[in-house]
């Protein structure tokens, strides 16, 4: 179930000045409260409510209701995520579908709840849950068109944010790969000079040390490239070169 995160405004702005996912989810919750009649509080979660990738609540009341669902491991939010359909309850504290939740929610102010799945195509990417302090106040059948608009807007916001995050992750991975490639190329040249061999043999020596020592090749290359005048790796690399040359000789002899 979602952990409601109610942070002060200065915690919801990303370091790069862009709108953070936390801020967007909070804005979605605020939009829902304004759009859904007789609702008072709301929360939004991304991913499986049992282990959300992110979540936000617009109030302590919504946060408490989210927490009760998480601790009970049941409730309308989880059901909406699982089924991909809206789930409503007149009273969280008296709904026989979720007996554990009923006991945990009893001390809180929340009574009615309406959970709307947020979708990207056929995939459920999160859940928007609105709450009321009046039992029976929320009914998905009273204004389905309005609820659909709210769910569609929220889905677009969450999906767009995730697409941006995926693009940023891809760009970051490409940058890491390019830096790793550059470090490996530099290390090949350094090792070739220090050991008096070809860059091809130098690369094989680096790869051998990487495998023997269970060290990532890019990390080993960075160590070599950071000290081109000589370091403690020379002995290891020299021994690895001997192994490489011997292996090649055996291959040529048997070939």
Image: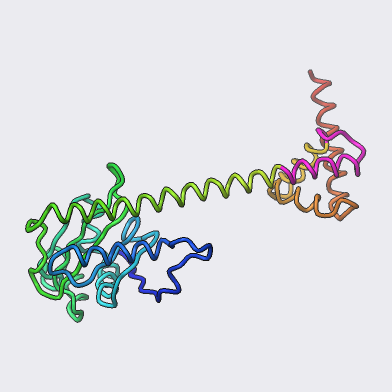
- Judging depth in this view, the residue of 27 and 218 nearest the camera is 27
Q: Residue at x 15, y 75 (%)?
A: 133
Looking at the picture, does residue 246 appear above or below residue 68? above
Q: Main secondary structure of the magenta part?
A: helix
Looking at the picture, does residue 51 appear above or below residue 132? above
> Looking at the rendering, in which quadrant would you find the C terminus?
top right
* Residue 183 locus on image (x, y percent): 74, 46
Residue 25 placement, left or right of 206? left
* Residue 91 locus on image (x, y percent): 11, 70
Query: Is 197 covered by the magenta stretch?
Result: yes
Question: Quarter of the image holding residue 64?
Answer: bottom left
- Judging depth in this view, the residue of 96 and 2 nearest the camera is 2
- Judging depth in this view, the residue of 111 and 82 nearest the camera is 111
Question: Quarter of the image holding residue 114?
Answer: bottom left
Residue 176 placement, left or right of 237? left
Residue 79 placement, left or right of 191? left
* Residue 134 locus on image (x, y percent): 11, 74
The range drawn in magenta is 182-201
* Residue 12 locus on image (x, y percent): 43, 69
Q: Residue at x 84, y 21 (%)?
A: 253
Query: Is 1 covered by the magenta stretch?
Result: no
């Amino acid at each position: 179930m979602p952990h409601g995160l109610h942070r002060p405004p200065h915690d919801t702005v990303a370091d790069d000045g862009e709108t953070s996912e936390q801020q967007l989810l909070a804005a979605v919750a605020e939009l829902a409260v304004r759009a859904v009649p007789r609702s008072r509080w709301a929360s939004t979660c991304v991913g499986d409510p049992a282990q959300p990738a992110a979540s936000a609540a617009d109030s302590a009341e919504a946060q408490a209701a989210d927490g009760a669902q998480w601790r009970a491991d049941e409730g309308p939010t989880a059901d909406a995520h699982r089924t991909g359909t809206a789930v409503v309850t007149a009273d969280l504290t008296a709904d026989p579908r979720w007996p554990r939740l009923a006991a945990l929610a009893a001390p809180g102010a929340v009574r009615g709840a309406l959970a709307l799945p947020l979708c990207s195509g056929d995939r459920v990417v999160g859940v928007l849950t609105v709450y009321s302090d009046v039992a029976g106040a929320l009914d998905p059948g009273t204004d389905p068109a309005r609820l659909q608009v709210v769910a569609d807007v929220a889905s677009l916001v969450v999906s767009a944010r995730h697409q941006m995050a995926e693009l940023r992750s891809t760009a970051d991975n490409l940058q890491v790969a390019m830096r790793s490639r550059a470090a490996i190329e530099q290390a090949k040249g350094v090792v070739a000079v220090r050991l008096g061999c070809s860059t091809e043999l130098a690369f094989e020596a680096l790869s051998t040390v990487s495998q023997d020592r269970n060290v990532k090749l890019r990390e080993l290359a960075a160590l070599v490239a950071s000290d081109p005048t000589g370091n403690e790796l020379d002995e290891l690399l020299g021994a690895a070169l001997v192994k490489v040359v011997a292996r090649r000789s055996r291959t040529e002899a048997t070939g």
